[in-house]
Image (cartoon, rainbow, N blue to C red):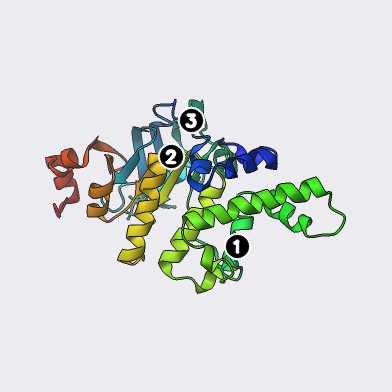
Amino acid sequence: MSDAADQPVEDVANKVDEGALGAFASGVDTSVDYPLQVEGLEKSFGGITAVDGATFEVESGTLTGLIGPNGAGKSTTFNLITGMLKPDAGTVTFNGEDITGEEPHQIANRGMVRTFQIARELSEMTVLENMMLAPKHQRGETLWRSVMPGVRDDVREQEEELLERVWEVLDFFDIAHIAEEYAGNLSGGQRKLLEMARALLTDPDMLLLDEPFAGVNPTLEKKLLEHVHELREQGYTFLLVEHDMDLIMNNCEHVIVLHQGSVLTEGTPDEIRSNEEVIEAYLGGNV
Ligand SMILES: Nc1ncnc2c1ncn2[C@@H]1O[C@H](COP(=O)(O)OP(=O)(O)OP(=O)(O)O)[C@@H](O)[C@H]1O
């Protein structure tokens, strides 16, 4: 299902019929134990080594946290995995295939997406319009074509099904009631919900979340976390970068600690909490 965006619309729409949650879960391939494998990743900027041999795996169906002190290389690692940056060395393997150096849209088509902040120009569009543009431009284009005269009925039918899926995803994230609202008018938390809804519409296997709770009030944070857990239970895999240590420790089953660009240690939250090296790395020792 990772390349659902490339499938005929009717295939994508078939998943809609199974109901919101079933629709998302229907195509997740849980047979791959470690969908993401990062091996010896390196990246320098001038004289600064941001990522220095990072090696780790993310297990299928887990909510895995990537933590580390400021400047540890978390964002750079995310950018290397998702194709925003090219590594100097090392490999990124996704669902058993080497994706090192691929472009972000190729990686997204394979089923690995990261959430993005809503760009300023999209703030002037409604939530619904943002959703229609989310997965691939062709989806948005087909929607607009459907409202034009002379379009064949079967095409229009497929697009109605696609629109139905958009509404299901909006419903799932409890933002259907603000579909006509301009994205620029949303609260910080509602924007985060929309960002995740947009990512989910591409029907990914794995989501990389970079600080998804920043600026979100506690009520919406709880809601957002519930959605993440619900999706994880359906088989989706999450890699999460988050500064809030309590949030990581209370929600992730596995935690990877980056320090100076490489993996210091990894384990369960309890193991990480009591790890002396980790406490030292953070200096403050508030883990
Ligand atoms: N584009 C860049 N040019 C130069 N140096 C960079 C660039 N991006 C990152 N760095 C440097 O690489 C190191 C790792 O940065 P990175 O942002 O990946 O760490 P991080 O763990 O995400 O940090 P934080 O928790 O503060 O967001 C830092 O020393 C940073 O200053």
Numbered mark located on residue 128 in the image: 1
Q: Is residue 273 left or right of residue 84?
A: left
Mark 3, secondary structure of its residue = loop
Instruction: Please name whichever residue, 68 or 270, is drawn nearer the observer in this view of the structure.
Output: 270
Numbered mark located on residue 170 in the image: none
The residue sitting at the bottom extreme is 185
**Residue 260 location, quadrant:** top left
Picture layout, residue 196 above or below residue 50? below
* Residue labelled 2 has its Cβ within 8 Å of some atom of ligand 1: no
Instruction: Please name whichever residue, 218 or 35, is drawn nearer the observer in this view of the structure.
Output: 218
Mark 1 or mark 2: name the one nearer the start of the chain. 1
Total numbered circles: 3
Q: Is residue 68 in view from this perspective?
A: no
- Circles 3 and 2, Cβ within 8 Å, touching? The answer is no
Mark 3 or mark 2: name the one nearer the start of the chain. 3
Q: Which residue is mark 3?
A: 29
Say which amino acid is labelled 1.
Leu
User: How far separated are the C-alphas under marks 1 and 2?
Assistant: 24 Å
What residue is drawn where x is 61% and y is 68%?
Answer: 125
Q: Position of residue 115 (x, y in %)?
A: 47, 52
* Residue labelled 3 has its Cβ within 8 Å of some atom of ligand 1: no
Mark 3 or mark 1: name the one nearer the start of the chain. 3
Say which amino acid is labelled 2.
Tyr
Q: Residues within 10 Å of mark 3 (few under 14, many from 20)?
A: some
What residue is drawn where x is 52% and y is 67%?
Answer: 177
Mark 2, secondary structure of its residue = loop
Q: Which quadrant holds the N terminus?
A: top right
What residue is drawn where x is 48% and y is 30%?
Answer: 29
Q: Is residue 265 left or right of residue 82?
A: left
User: How far separated are the C-alphas under marks 3 and 1?
Assistant: 29 Å
Numbered mark located on residue 236 in the image: 2
